[in-house]
Image: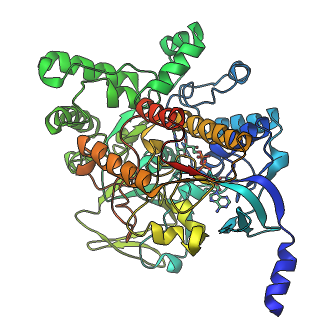
Amino acid sequence: AMVATRASDERGTPQQVDVAVVGAGFAGLYLLHRLRKAGLSAVALEEAGDVGGTWYWNRYPGARCDIQTIDYSYTFDPELETAWTWSEKYAAQPEILRYLGFVADRYDLRRDIRFKTKVTEARWDEKAERWLITTSDGAPVSCRHYIMATGCLSAPKPPEIDGVKDFKGEVYFTGRWPHEGVNLAGKRVAVIGTGSSAIQSIPLIAEQAAHLTVFQRTPNFALPAHNGPAPSDRVSLLQADRAAYREQARQSMAGVPYPQQTVVSWQLSDAERRERFERAWAAGDLVHILTQLWADQAVDVDGNKIVQDLIREKIRAAVKDPQTAAALMPDDHPFGAKRPCLDTNYYATYNRPNVTLVNLRQEPIKAITGSGISTSGRSFDVDVIVFATGFDAMTGAIRAVHPITGRGGKSLTDVWAQGPQSYLGLTVEGFPNFFMITGPGSPSVLSNMAVSIEQHVDWVVDRLAALRDAGFTTIEPTETAQAGWNRHMADCSMVTLHRLANTWYTGANVPGKVQGLMPYTGGVGPYRSICDEVVSRGMLGFKLT
Ligand code: FAD
């Protein structure tokens, strides 16, 4: 009893708000703005020292977006759009962070954000019909609604290799890069991982380091970003009719305004296919190459293999050493079934005399020692180890708040023991007034997330306002609706090639994580229509009290 009293004193009396938001990234910031405008009181709780989320934490060399920045922006306020101009086609992390700071200032959001405050627990109080949120620092929060805007790629995956603690040199994680930067000049550096962050940082690390050794388990498809000014054709389209441009993005499959292709690969000649491919390669645009080549590339193994072969040909041409080139060529997953990467000089970096690729398929890492990394075949002495080992994606940050206790004492971890269950990727049965922004079961990481975030935030805030206006206090999906959504998720995923790859989309990168495709594959536009239909049909699948 003594301990409990002292703990509650330290924590203070709960802060009372209508809505608690966890996270102050792209999603949390827009939530705060919309909630205020809807007349709901809100607080955002953020572990970081400032706003930005992804763009606060990921400060590794070369960090930048891989959706063109004119598309990876807020669109809710036309005046905001004209008040900000991006300097590049793909803005680098410092510029995106400045943008999010600019947004926070413009709408005076920081006054409702509690920084350096981690949410550790959340409990639904059935009598009061409120959530009690426990924080690592300061008062708990009592709120009617609890919204997790905790990010799909915000919980770094811990290294699974023995001996990290024994290593005497410097250790860095791309997802937690020091703010003051790291001096790598003259050092022997190891990078573990070859996902998106590694592919962005490796060329820049190689320029600084005395020697760089890259440890690769799974090669990824990467295509050149051709960064520079935003392409004039895209900018003209946007400026000609901003509203129509943004609307096309909202209705599109991936959240970027491109038309849907109808021509399939076998209707095109070899020459026509190559011409389309070369145009896509020159465009330096992920969404272009993922959606604009031919209609069957993402759904049919043969249509997909043609793209794979064309990319492998590019890798072969870029990398001088044939053995290294072969090791860099992905051959175990369809193109697009694992997140492809955008790069600047990635493949050419392996032609440098100070860069070595270690293929862990042939010689797995045995241990990290005091002086470096040992594989089954060799030992590498290094001064620095950079872990570019990715994230516990989509569910990692949600499950890290533990326990989240819903109705009848049920914990979310238990409900999700066999994988994430949700209705629309937004809500979970048994957890009233609980929402996830870009949760598992929504298009999320398979989309331009700026578009998906705005859609989720608008939908949630509009519902909360409507609920209040109609005199309801709780909202929760029914078991039937949730089961139906899971069925629909599974049906949609069977149409794509995602089922043929073990990736972070399916939880395969985290040992012990339940396997299953987490994002919704039905597309951004169709998903939006479903969410809107739920509303127009009287909150179909929800129970309101
Ligand atoms: P985040 O930006 O991840 O913010 C979540 C915040 O919640 C974090 O600040 C975190 O500290 C906080 N948080 C989490 N748990 C807690 C807790 N328990 N208590 C308190 N605070 C907590 N997407 C694209 O669409 N296009 C791109 O080009 C693109 N590039 C990317 C590049 C990198 C390197 C990475 C890592 C991701 C990229 N993404 C991209 C995905 C990116 O995460 C999203 O676009 C977007 O930034 C997500 O915003 P968010 O607010 O949902 O989450």
Is residue 372 visible in this depiction of the protein? Answer: yes
Side of 166 relative to 265 (left or right): right
- Using the image, determine if residue 20 lies above or below residue 223: below
Q: Quadrant of residue 389?
A: bottom left
Residue 119 lies, in percent from the top left, at: 69, 65
In the rendered image, the vertical position of residue 145 relative to residue 463, given as above or below: below
Q: Please tell me whether residue 10 is drawn above or below residue 17 in the rendered image.
A: below
Considering every residue shown, the one lying at the far bottom of the view is 2
Q: Quadrant of the N terminus?
A: bottom right
Q: Residue furthest top?
A: 240
Residue in the image at 81% along x and 36% along y: 105
What residue appears at the point 38 percent right and 70 percent down from the top-left corner?
A: 511
List x then y, in percent, for residue 128: 74, 65
Q: Nearer the viewer, residue 419 or 16?
A: 16
The residue at the point 53 percent across, 30 percent down is 90
Residue 327 in sight? no
Q: Residue at 24%, 62% (x, y): give it.
A: 361
Locate residue 285: give its quadrant. Answer: top left
Q: Is residue 279 left or right of residue 306?
A: right
- Foreground residue, 469 or 530? 469
**How does the figure colour the protein chain or chains?**
rainbow
342 or 445: which is nearer to us? 445
User: Could you tell me how many numbered marks the image carries?
Assistant: 0
Question: In the image, 431: left or right of 295?
Answer: right
Q: Position of residue 443 (x, y in %)?
A: 44, 41
Can you give x and y, in whole percent of width and height, for residue 414 in the image?
Answer: 47, 72
